[in-house]
Amino acid sequence: SQTIHQWPATLVQPVGSPLSLECTVEGTSNPNLYWYRQAAGRGLQLLFYSVGIGQISSEVPQNLSASRPQDRQFILSSKKLLLSDSGFYLCAWSNPRVPRIYGYTFGSGTRLTVV
Amino acid sequence: ILNVEQSPQSLHVQEGDSTNFTCSFPSSNFYALHWYRWETAKSPEALFVMTLNGDEKKKGRISATLNTKEGYSYLYIKGSQPEDSATYLCAFTSTGGGNKLTFGTGTQLKVEL
């Protein structure tokens, strides 16, 4: 069966520090991968998605970047965090070989607080 | 930009009450509408996916309807229980939108004893 792992669960970082959040998927190959963020009082906003190794699409201009160094690994990074980067970050995957109605499977999320 | 709106933003009900909330989405280029349930400190969990106008889905005490012509979906919970407390998210997929889901802001439900 497929599983998705996301870590860390919580993170408190000072403004200006770097960030690295990692997400890995097991039990499948060539998944579509996604990073979402929920800022306070707002809905889930798609930040990045990837359909393959090294293929990253950015949905919104921001202080963050994403990389996919391996097929089932998706990393969210920042060189210098801003206060506005605080929020709840969710990684998700979908299977491109099944109909799109099957939606996503989510990781358990990372609560990032920038202080 | 696709706008998916949910109302109300939050809801407090008593145990045993029935409740419903709304998701509105663009009626053009519709492909699918998803409902997720998101409990604190857990992953969002898929409840329903609906694709056809007039679709109704049911899972225990929770049901959902879909109107693609006017661009809305209702989620109903019958006889709310404290364990129903969660944020309920709807998400829209458009034709030509690939696998991307556009989420609403969610309805936060709190069921009190």
Image: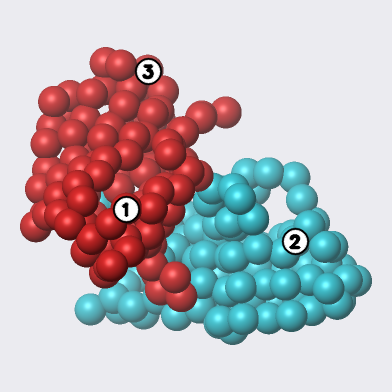
Chain colours: A cyan, B red
Q: Is residue B68 left or right of residue A91?
A: left
Say which of A101 and A26 sits in front: A101
Q: Is residue A82 left or right of residue B8?
A: right
Residue identified by numbered label 3? B28
Q: Amino acid at mark 2?
A: Asp
* Chain at numbered mark 2: A
Q: Is residue A13 left or right of residue B33?
A: right
Q: Are marks 2 and 3 in contact (CB under 8 Å)?
A: no
Say which of A3 and B57 sits in front: B57
Real-space Cα separation, disc 1 to disc 3, in angstroms: 34 Å
Residue identified by numbered label 1? B13
Earlier-in-chain disc, 1 versus 3:
1
Residue identified by numbered label 2? A85
Q: In which quadrant of the rendered image does the C terminus of chain A lie?
A: bottom right
Q: Which of pointers 2 and 3 indicates the residue nearer the eye?
A: 2
Say which of B106 and B31 sits in front: B106
Q: Amino acid at mark 3?
A: Ser
Q: Could you say where residue B56 lies in the image, as x and y percent from the top left? A: 11, 36
Q: Residue at x 32, y 53 (%)?
A: B13
Q: Residues within 10 Å of mark 2 (few under 14, many from 20)?
A: some
Residue A91 visible in this rendered orientation of the protein:
yes
